[in-house]
Amino acid sequence: MENTEALIGQSENKNIPQHVAIIMDGNGRWAQLQGKGRVAGHKAGVESVRQVVATARKSNVKALTLFAFSSENWQRPAKEVSVLMDLFMYVLTKEVKRLHKHNIRFQVVGDLSRFSEKLQKNITKSEQLTAGNTGLVLSIAANYGGRWDIVQAAKKLASSVKQGTMSLDDINEETLNGETCLANLPTLDLLIRTGGDYRISNFLLWQAAYAELYFTDTLWPDFNEVEFLKALNCFDHRERRFGKTGEQARNEKT
């Protein structure tokens, strides 16, 4: 098995993505393979979150966005949803203190209106605690959907036009992007999905326009520091052209 030092050594240019997003998939299947209930997988996945956050911080990633709960996940069994809410509360009350200690800024993005008043208050409290931190920005996408994000951004722009504070001609990619949930972060560079599925499931549709995609069969509770470093090293060897020719892109780097 490859160790951490060997993986770090594989990277030649140290082209570190500024913003990494992860679809944390496979908790339920991991639990089933262990002969346990699905909720056990979600609990085991918390340790993977810890490892990924620590690795991102050590690797000088500026922003890490984790897909914790989609707007479609409400359709899951009530018990599973309840456990996910309990885990969310646990993270807010226990893990955020650890994040604050390491100068990590914490924020939750998504439509928070469906969460309990207690949970919403804890989210606000956690964001306020870490608001002044200058290190890694950890965003948790909860009750989030990529289409919802684009729609709510469009509504804000439409409201501004209606109120006369901006004109229709002022609407462009830059102004729409400025109203999306992650407008305060660097452009998304790398989108990872664990669990073996090859789709992005309505996650960061706007932001992923030119992101590099990395899919792995590894189930989320098994996605540790070594697995994350594999993804970062794979990114380092990608040629990012942004519509230009390979020769143009290479000349710009020299």
Image: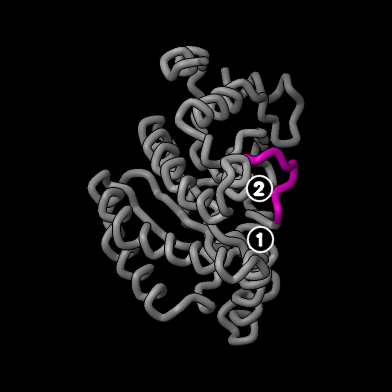
For residue 146, the mark is 1
- Is residue 179 among the parts visible in the rendering? no
Residue 13 falls inside the magenta stretch:
no
The C terminus lies in quadrant: top right
Where are the magenta residues, as a range? Answer: 192-201
For residue 60, the mark is none
- 80 on left or right of 92: right
Q: Amino acid at mark 1?
A: Gly
Q: Which residue is mark 2?
A: 208
User: Where does residue 240 sit, x and y in percent of width and height?
Assistant: 66, 29
User: Where does residue 14 sit, x and y in percent of width and height?
Assistant: 48, 21
Counting labels gives 2
- Return the disc, 2 or 1, that comes first in the chain's sequence: 1
Q: Is residue 121 above or below residue 133?
A: below
Identify the main secondary structure in magenta: loop
Q: Identify which residue is drawn at 35% across, 61% down.
A: 92
